[in-house]
Amino acid sequence: MTQVIVIGGGLAGLAGAVAMADAGLQVELYERRPILGGRATSFIHPSSGERVDNCQHVLLGCCVNLLDFYNRLGVAEHIDFHKEIPFIDESSRVSVIGPSSLPAPFHLLPSFLRLKTMGIRDKLSIVRTVAGMIRHVARLRSTGGPAAAPSPTVAPSPAASHSAEPSEPSPAASHGAEPSPDSMAAWLEAHGATKRAVEAFWKPFLISALNDELDDIDADYAIETAVRAMLLNRSGYEVGLPAVPLGDLYAPCIDYIEQRGGRVIFNRGVTGISVHDGKVASISLQDGSSVEAGAYLSALPFDVLCKLLPQSQTSDPYFSMLDGLSVSPITAVHVWFDRPVTELGYAAVIGRRIQWIFNQSSRHAGAFSADNGGAYLGLVVSASDDWMKTPRQVIIDQAMEDLESLLPAVRRAKLLKAIVVKEGRATFAPRPGCDALRPGPSSPFPNFSIAGDWVQTGWPATMESAVRSGYHAAEVLLRTRGVRAPILKPDLPAEGLMKWVTGLRSF
Ligand SMILES: Cc1cc2nc3c(=O)[nH]c(=O)nc-3n(C[C@H](O)[C@H](O)[C@H](O)COP(=O)(O)OP(=O)(O)OC[C@H]3O[C@@H](n4cnc5c(N)ncnc54)[C@H](O)[C@@H]3O)c2cc1C
């Protein structure tokens, strides 16, 4: 009998599978689709024939577990890190946020003060709100708040990480300890952020990092993200962009798992999970067969997991509370031109519908076609609810209108083709209080651990959260077999003043 079955070949499932294979377990991974990567993947677009990423995916220097996963696979060299983040405003002016020689948390301050996109009052409001964020985090730390998110060194007991009841959050349920009723928009207003500072900085940064409107984002989540990325450590904010299609990053997983005695099985969706005597007994597959293993790691989206379990089990609070999680969409627009249209490698966009521009032709060096001397841009809109029901051609027209106003060269270029990828369920929505609904990795069944970006990790729904959850779920399963292998990597250490401001060396 197989030792462990992993369900789902997204980042959470792959990270869990690779970590368990490394720890000497024989792993069988079942994936519904013919490709790996789940919501962060590449595919051949049916009508254009182009191989594209479903959407540009960005990581930051603080994504230590994702980077560890890439290192295990030997693909970390395909991530290009950028220390400078260009912002392009309504008048096509480009300002850059970048490092200075100052220690954390002041390392980005000089570049903020030089921004052309806002006035001095707005810059001072950013300094004020950042100081408020540091105080907020220090307060959360002193009351046992978010710093308690899964620690790489302290393996929580199954009972603690089970965190079934929203009213009885586990120590691992970070914000769950005291869910904030506040949205980030309300918090920023209360802390004196000017309208322009919100438009020209907080919105571009936080909407794309958390994938929702500021009115709908839990303030604790947003503040944790801002502090972790921008203030804690000098390299936390650095922007990592894959230099190859996303799918190429996971290709080594297959050999990796097979060389350690396991298998990756594609096109084999799981259709049911059966439970017997309080344990998972087997899974059934779309071809009608069923398979058994000693242990199981589910890395399914939360709604899919609940549908596959016997109905009698989904009333357990561990699963029933997932009904309270909602989702938020992201739309990617891919456009090809007959000539170069910008020298920027990428940029955050202020005051338009499109939020980020990624110059794929300059970065992928032939990995993606740019039609001989042309240009290929990836445009991203997070929290794109408005576009979910909008016809694709209208989306393309609106994106082109934005591009023409931002990049004058686009007006002279010919649009060769365009693709719209709508991801309606891109991430769970980080609504105020939602953290209390995220369970830990130990399910009610001792041989069944749970991973996915939506599991309690202390992070919003990101690739880092997915990998963390996979590593954590693997740790839990290994512990049930008597193996105490720390897999989760420690966060970047707090540096400079942040060491004593947060009262912690790691965040
Ligand atoms: C458009 C978009 C842009 C994003 N941008 C970023 C970004 O810039 N940076 C960032 O960090 N994050 C980003 N994210 C979020 C990131 O992609 C996710 O957080 C992460 O990929 C989730 O991984 P996961 O393994 O938890 O889930 P998933 O990727 O959803 O994996 C679940 C897997 O289970 C499989 N599956 C489903 N049902 C079954 C079944 N019945 N049987 C077997 N297998 C099944 C699926 O096919 C899938 O492979 C973005 C997401 C989207 C959609």
Image (cartoon, helix red, strand yellow):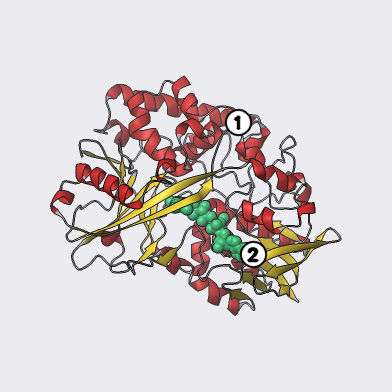
Indicate the quadrant containing the N terminus: top left, top right, bottom left or bottom right: bottom right
Image coordinates of residue 89 in percent, x first then y, are 25, 37
Residue 140 — which label? 1
- Relative to 410, say whether 293 is above or below: below
Asked whether 391 or 68 is in front, the reply is 391
- Relative to 486, say whether 266 is above or below: below
Q: Residues within 10 Å of mark 2 (few under 14, many from 20)?
A: many
Q: Amino acid at mark 2?
A: Ile
Q: Is residue 428 left or right of residue 114?
A: right
Asked whether 48 or 69 is in front, the reply is 48
Q: Is residue 462 left or right of residue 145?
A: left
Indicate the quadrant containing the C terminus: top left, top right, bottom left or bottom right: top right
Query: Residue at point 31% right, 64% down?
Result: 364
The answer to whether the residue bearing label 1 lies less than 8 angstroms from the nearest atom of ligand 1 is no
The answer to whether the residue bearing label 2 lies less than 8 angstroms from the nearest atom of ligand 1 is yes
Asked whether 495 or 436 is in front, the reply is 436
- Relative to 253, say whether 179 is above or below: above
Ranked by sequence position, the earlier of labels 2 and 1 is 2
- Relative to 226, say whether 303 is above or below: below
Determine if residue 16 is in view.
no
Image coordinates of residue 407 in percent, x first then y, are 20, 46
Q: Residues within 10 Å of mark 1 (few under 14, many from 20)?
A: many
Quadrant of res 125? top left
Determine if residue 295 is in view.
yes
Image coordinates of residue 65 in percent, x first then y, are 54, 55
Kindly state the secondary structure of the residue where label 1 is placed: helix
Q: Are marks 2 and 1 in contact (CB under 8 Å)?
A: no
Image coordinates of residue 309 in percent, x first then y, are 73, 57
Residue 7 — which label? 2
Kindly state the secondary structure of the residue where label 2 is placed: strand
Closer to us: mark 2 or mark 1?
2
